[in-house]
Image (cartoon, rainbow, N blue to C red):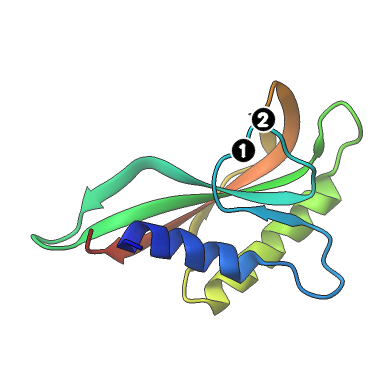
Amino acid sequence: MGALADLRGKAADALTPGDGDDWDVHPLPVDAIVPPAFMLIWSDPWLTPATHCQWSARLDVICVSNRVDVEPGVEILETLVETAIARLAGAGLPAITAGRPANFEVGGLLYLASRLTLSQPVSP
């Protein structure tokens, strides 16, 4: 595995459900999702130069709470975001930004979601 796959794997491992957790973790983009869930996607910009031999990789953790047309899901989303921030920080992957709740489309359906962005040094 390369540095980028290692980063994505480390983030997915940090979010893996434990006893009593009821969410799924998708380490890659998917075309269908059952909330609550976390989905990892590369951010834009994906990579930016940090030094002459190191880059900064940006990875987004999409926290998905509910379909927009079913129920609001704000409380679920708040719990997902708080949990993700704590678990990622514990794994040495602190989020640098947390986006506001917004619609996020997966497979033609709209979900209430928030985007956490991680930025980590890598040597691809």
Is residue 95 visible from the viewing direction of this image? no
- The disc at residue 106 is 2
User: What type is the residue that disc 2 sits on?
Assistant: Val
Task: Give percent across and percent down for residue 15.
Answer: 64, 65
Q: Nearer the viewer, residue 46 or 10?
A: 10
Q: Residue at x 45, y 52 (%)?
A: 59
Q: Residue at x 71, y 34 (%)?
A: 32
| Residue under pointer 1 | 30
Q: Determine the image quadrant of residue 52.
A: bottom left
Task: Give percent across and percent down for residue 54.
Answer: 18, 62
Location of the N terminus by quadrant is: bottom left
Q: Residue at x 32, y 63 (%)?
A: 3
Q: Residue furthest front?
A: 1
Which of pointers 1 and 2 lies earlier in the amino acid sequence?
1
Q: Determine the image quadrant of residue 106.
A: top right
Q: Nearer the viewer, residue 122 or 83?
A: 122
Which of pointers 1 and 2 indicates the residue nearer the eye?
Answer: 1
Location of the C terminus by quadrant is: bottom left
| Label 1 with label 2: CB-CB less than 8 Å | yes
